[in-house]
Image (cartoon, rainbow, N blue to C red):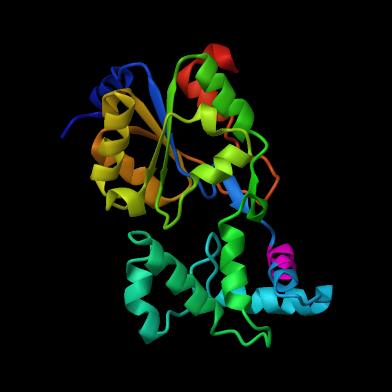
Amino acid sequence: MPDGDDTARRGASRRPVKAVLFDFHGTLAQVEEPGGWVLAAAAACGVQLDRVRATALADRLLTAGRAGGPLPARVPPQLAELWADRDLYEHAHRAAYVGLAGTVDAGIDGFADALYERVLVPAGWVPYPDTAPTLGALREAGVRVAVVSNIGFDLRPLFDAWGLADLVDAFVLSYEVGRCKPDPAIFWRACGLLGVDPEETLMVGDTPADAGAVRAGCAVLVLPAADPGRPNGLGSVLSLTHPHLR
C-alpha cells in the first residue's frame, strides 16, 4: 500500500485542469423556495392561496417528494418502477413526481401537473450568485465546461433564458445518455464531448453521486448546496483551475 508521501506525489502529478464538469441542481442552481412554488402552481390552476395554506401544503408536498427537493419519505408501490427510472426517461420523471404530488390532496384540479411544470421553466429555479461569474471566468481562461446531471428533462432552455448557454460547451443529461451518476460512463461521455482526458478534468457537485467521478479518473470538488440566492462557494473552482482567476 502506498504511503502518504507517495499518494501526495501522485496527486501533485495530475495534469493541469482543461475542463470542468458541473452538476446542476444544488451546484449551479436551486429550486425556488417551497412556498413560492406552491403559490405559483396554484395560480396556474386559477386558485389564489393564502400564505398560511401554501406553507402547510408545501410542507406536505416536500415530505411526499419534490423534483429538485428532498427525496420522498416513502415511495408508494405503484410508483416504485417509475421512481427507479425517473432519471433515465422523460415520461418516468414526470409520472413519478406528478404521482408523488398527487398523494397530497390539495383540492385543486390539475395541481400536481402544475407543480411539476414549475421545474421545467426558468422561473422555477434560481441560479446561484457565483454561477454566471464562475462560468464566465472559465470561458475567458479557455477552460471547457459541461453540465452533467441526473435529470429527466432538458436543461438547455433554462440556460438559454438565463443567458448562460454560450458558457457551456456540452450538456450530458442522464435521460439522454442512458447513464446516471455515479456510473463512470457518464463522466467519460462528458470528457469525450469536451475532447479532454479525465485526468485533466474537475467534477464539481454537491452529492456522493458527483464524487463518483473519481472512479472515472477525474478530480472532484464537493460543495454544500445552499438555499436559493445564497452563495455556495462555487467561485472556489477558479482557485483550483487557474489561481490567477481569483
**Where is residue 223 drawn, in percent x and y?**
52, 42
Instruction: Looking at the picture, tell me which residue is in the foreground, 57 or 48.
Output: 48
**Where is residue 158 drawn, in percent x and y?**
57, 45
The correct choice, above or below, for 141 with respect to 46 in the image is above
Q: Examine the image and state in which quarter residue 74 appears.
A: bottom left
Q: Is residue 37 magenta?
A: yes
Which residue of the protein is positioned furthest toward the top in this rendering? 244
**Majority SS type along the magenta span:** helix
Instruction: Looking at the picture, tell me which residue is in the foreground, 226 or 158.
Output: 158
Q: Is residue 79 magenta?
A: no
Q: Is residue 135 left or right of residue 229?
A: left
Quadrant in which the C terminus appears: top right
Q: Residue at x 57, y 38 (%)?
A: 160
Q: Residue at x 32, y 40 (%)?
A: 213
The correct choice, above or below, for 180 with respect to 22 in the image is below
Q: Is residue 181 visible?
A: no
Q: Residue at x 31, y 53 (%)?
A: 180
The correct choice, above or below, for 222 with respect to 103 in the image is above
Q: Is residue 4 left or right of residue 131?
A: left
**Where is residue 83 drawn, in percent x and y?**
38, 71
Q: Is residue 58 visible?
A: yes
The correct choice, above or below, for 4 with respect to 114 in the image is above
**Where is residue 124 drawn, in percent x and y?**
64, 56
- In this picture, which residue range is highlighted in magenta? 34-40
